[in-house]
Image: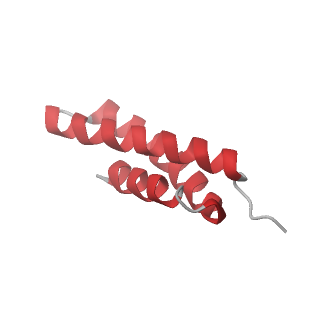
Amino acid sequence: MAALVCGVVAFVSTFWVSAHVISSWFGTLGFGVGLYSQYLSATTPQRTLNIVGLVGSFVGAALGIAHGGFLPHP
């Protein structure tokens, strides 16, 4: 569930270029948590939510890095 929340936050924050720090960090955190959660998941509904969170986290992290990266601009 944490991966899904991080994925949603990372994906939604990519709509604002100035929120690149949020999308980069939440995307990276959600991707790592999602991979570990996928490793531990036992049921198909858990795996489904993990994959949705992983995809959202990956897209959010990729666009956040493309828009400016992990640190705010001076």
Q: Nearer the viewer, residue 46 or 62?
A: 62
Q: Where residue 30 appears, x then y in whole percent?
A: 45, 48
Relative side of 17 to 43, left or right: right
Given the current orientation, which residue lies at the most extreme right position? Answer: 74
Quarter of the figure with the C terminus? bottom right
Examine the rendering and report whether any part of residue 68 can be seen: yes
State the image quarter where residue 18 is shown.
bottom right
Q: Where residue 23 appears, x then y in whole percent?
A: 56, 56
Q: Residue at x 51, y 60 (%)?
A: 13
Q: Residue at x 61, y 64 (%)?
A: 19
**Total numbered labels:** 0
Q: Residue at x 42, y 44 (%)?
A: 56
Relative side of 42 to 66, left or right: left
Given the current orientation, which residue lies at the most extreme bottom position? Answer: 74
Q: Residue at x 63, y 60 (%)?
A: 17
Q: Where residue 41 appears, x then y in whole percent?
A: 24, 35
Relative side of 17 to 60, left or right: right
Q: With respect to residue 21, does 67 lie above or below?
A: above
Examine the rendering and report whether any part of residue 43 can be seen: no
Q: Nearer the viewer, residue 43 or 20?
A: 20
Relative side of 4 to 69, left or right: left
Question: What colour scheme governs how the chains and residues are painted in the rendered image of this protein?
Answer: secondary structure
